[in-house]
Image (cartoon, rainbow, N blue to C red):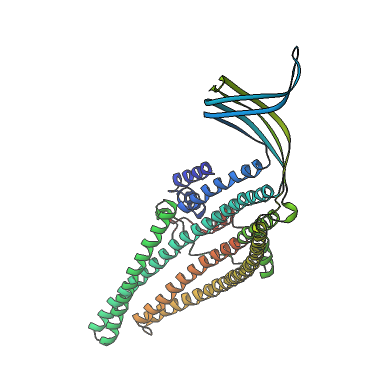
Amino acid sequence: MKIAALMGLLIYTASAGAANLGVTGAWQAAMDHDPAFAAARAQREAGQTHVAQARALWLPTLSAQGSAGYGDQETNTTDAAFSAPGFGSTNGVNFQTSITGGNTRQWAIVAEQPLLDASRRAGFTEQKNVAAMAEVQFEQARQDLLLRTAQTYLAVLNSRAQLDALRRLHAAAERAGATAQARYETGDIPATDMREARASADAIGVQQLEAQAAVVLSEAAFAQLTGLDAVALKRLPDSEPLQVSPPDSLEVWTRRALSDSRQLALQRLAVGTAAAQVDRYAPWSSPRVSVIAQVGRETMRGSGDFGNSGITSRQSSIGLQASVPLFTGGMRTAQRDEARALERKANADLEVIEQQVRQQVRTAWLGLTTAAARVRALQRLRSSTQERLGATQLGVEIGDRTALDLLNAESDFLRSGTDFHKAQTDWLLAQLQLQTLAGKLSEADLQRIDQHLVDASAEAK
């Protein structure tokens, strides 16, 4: 993934002069630069190890044991029966051994294969769910980065569009102020009209300073997220507005979210883990059965009451080992009650998250439909303000309108343009937010945004 992202970034960077950086290229850069996504990638790698940990719970284990040291040993056997070839048989024989401060050596190799163990079964489910949760969390982080990249990118475009409109408006205000000053000096207008024109220019100048600061901040946020300079970004075209189509119904989006929401996927895994914990402490699951095989040797050598002596024992065995707890002081019962309560909590949390997802989808869907309606309304407003601007310009030429009237008309037209620009970006982001809630946001969605953008070098119409 890192290699693909780097190649994509190099392609975009190399061609920045001819084709400016789009949202997809910005996201490819952000994947290798954003620390939050790097943390999510590392968390995913850690989660993948739990697959092997789950499998290991049911694989045989092999361990080696050894020890060395000093020790004493005395044995006294009385009334034993003794027999040996050539010696016959004798009863009432005593055997004694004695080693003081002897050297001891011991080693053993033990193999165990679990057959029945509810604790291991619960652990197996838990480890698999941890791995699955890591995958879901990584996908959630990936979609979050997709959305954050688009938001940061479009924020730059909006701030630049606002600044561009204010620059044009400030220039128009300066022209209107100069015209008003000239007409005031010739006595055509009163001083109040001249001062009002100056005040309008000064107010727009203040707004322009604020817009410049907004551009700097948005570009800095973009650079922090992607590690790239924001100078090569594309822009929305001034003509050929977005073709806004109505979204699918709320019911359709709700079904998608309830099926593929990452929040719900995580909580469903949590419910599965809680259910496994209940089974861990169920009465029928208390026995543990394993196959145990071992081989070992133990020696002790030294001197004692009867001179030098040595004891060597060897052992090897294989068989079934069973363990059934008979009384734990109420521990297992308390643990089972706790597991049941936590399972109920996990199921209740799942219902809460389902309600939240339904509400979030409803809010996002209404936001999308409202954004679509706003785009269409502002498109009509932009056309009407443009017609009003043309009529006012004609009125100024024939003397029916003042320069201040023209400034107000031009201000309404430019502001309708920035509002229309922002409405289009809001509609694009609303689509992405709804896709995120449904767990379906992908790079293809950013590529569709790129299809609406044009090179920054293209002349505005």
Judging depth in this view, the residue of 413 and 311 nearest the camera is 311
Judging depth in this view, the residue of 115 and 107 nearest the camera is 107
Q: Position of residue 141 (x, y in %)?
A: 54, 55
Q: Residue at x 73, y 52 (%)?
A: 285
- Residue 261 to residue 311: above or below: below
Q: Quadrant of residue 372?
A: bottom right
Judging depth in this view, the residue of 445 and 452 nearest the camera is 445
- Residue 57 to residue 355: above or below: above
Q: Residue at x 58, y 57 (%)?
A: 445
Q: Quadrant of residue 160?
A: bottom left
- Residue 48 to residue 182: above or below: above
Q: Residue furthest front?
A: 92
Image quarter in which the N terminus is found: top right
Q: Position of residue 240 (x, y in %)?
A: 53, 64
- Residue 251 to residue 70: above or below: below
> How many numbered callouts?
0
Q: Residue furthest top?
A: 86
Q: Position of residue 88 (x, y in %)?
A: 77, 15
Q: Position of residue 290 (x, y in %)?
A: 71, 40
33 vs 308, left or right, is left
Q: Residue at x 46, y 59 (%)?
A: 153
Judging depth in this view, the residue of 61 and 264 nearest the camera is 61
The answer to whether residue 34 shows anywhere in this view is no
Q: Quadrant of residue 225?
A: bottom left
The answer to whether residue 430 shows anywhere in this view is yes
170 vs 238, left or right, is left
